[in-house]
Amino acid sequence: NSLLRKFSCAGNISNISNLLSYMVRRRSHRHRLLEVVAVLSLLFRSSSSMSSCSSNSKMRLPLISVQGSGETDVNVVFRPQDPLRIPAGFDRTCQKARWNTRDMWDQLSDGTSPWFEADNESYIYWNRGNRKWWIDGPSGAGLYTNDAYTELPPPTGWVALAGAKEPLPNVEILENNDA
């Protein structure tokens, strides 16, 4: 698959470790093993196939575009973020509820799965606590969830949380050409 091919050219052990860890968490046991074997076989191909990779190439996670939702703040493009960085809106929600932000983020995020943020601080993340994707507005308030167990936010199947406006969002995965 194209993600694995791109990753085989990454040349970054930390990224390789993160991808393998991410795949193991997101797949059934059988699929975990098959994907790990696929990544390893791509990594250990002959040096001639690896030499065709640019020495400066790195894995880029895609951009996420949300469109058509009743909540205009989230109808934007989201960029991948460092899994260890906490979304500003998430922090605001925790502060308001008097929760420890770091503890709550560590409880709900696994520290390795990517999350995505828009310029207006809306964000999308995988919540390991309830095993759902969440689209949250800039305030940190949850607006939509999706229980699809996928590597990236799914295109459809979103559910509006109490107070969120319909129609439901459509999500599109976009190529990330950011430098």
Image: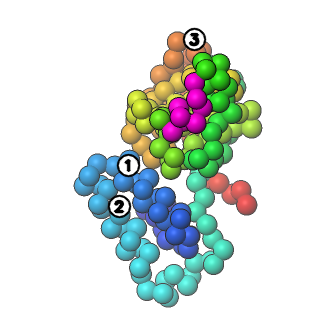
**Residue drawn at point x = 74 percent, y = 38 percent:** 119
Identify the magenta region: 99-106
- For residue 35, the mark is 2
- For residue 167, the mark is none
**Distance from the alpha carbon under mark 3 to that under mark 1:** 32 Å
- Name above or below for residue 163 compared with residue 9: above
- Tell me residue 105's x, y (percent): 54, 36
Q: Secondary structure at mark 1?
A: helix
Tag 3: amino acid? Gly
Residue farthest left in this picture: 30
Task: Indicate left or right for 45 with 29 as reference.
Answer: right
Q: Nearer the viewer, residue 63 or 17?
A: 17
- Label 3, on which residue? 163
Tag 2: amino acid? Glu
**Distance from the alpha carbon under mark 2 to that under mark 3:** 40 Å
Q: Residues within 10 Å of mark 1 (few under 14, many from 20)?
A: some
- Name above or below for residue 89 compared with residue 17: above
- Tell me residue 157's x, y (percent): 44, 29
**Residue drawn at point x = 58 percent, y = 29 percent:** 100
Q: Nearer the viewer, residue 25 or 143?
A: 25
- Tell me residue 136's x, y (percent): 60, 27
Q: Secondary structure at mark 3?
A: loop
Tag 1: amino acid? Arg
Quadrant showing the C terminus: bottom right
Task: Indicate left or right for 46 with 11 as reference.
Answer: left
- For residue 25, the mark is 1
Residue 155 visible here? no
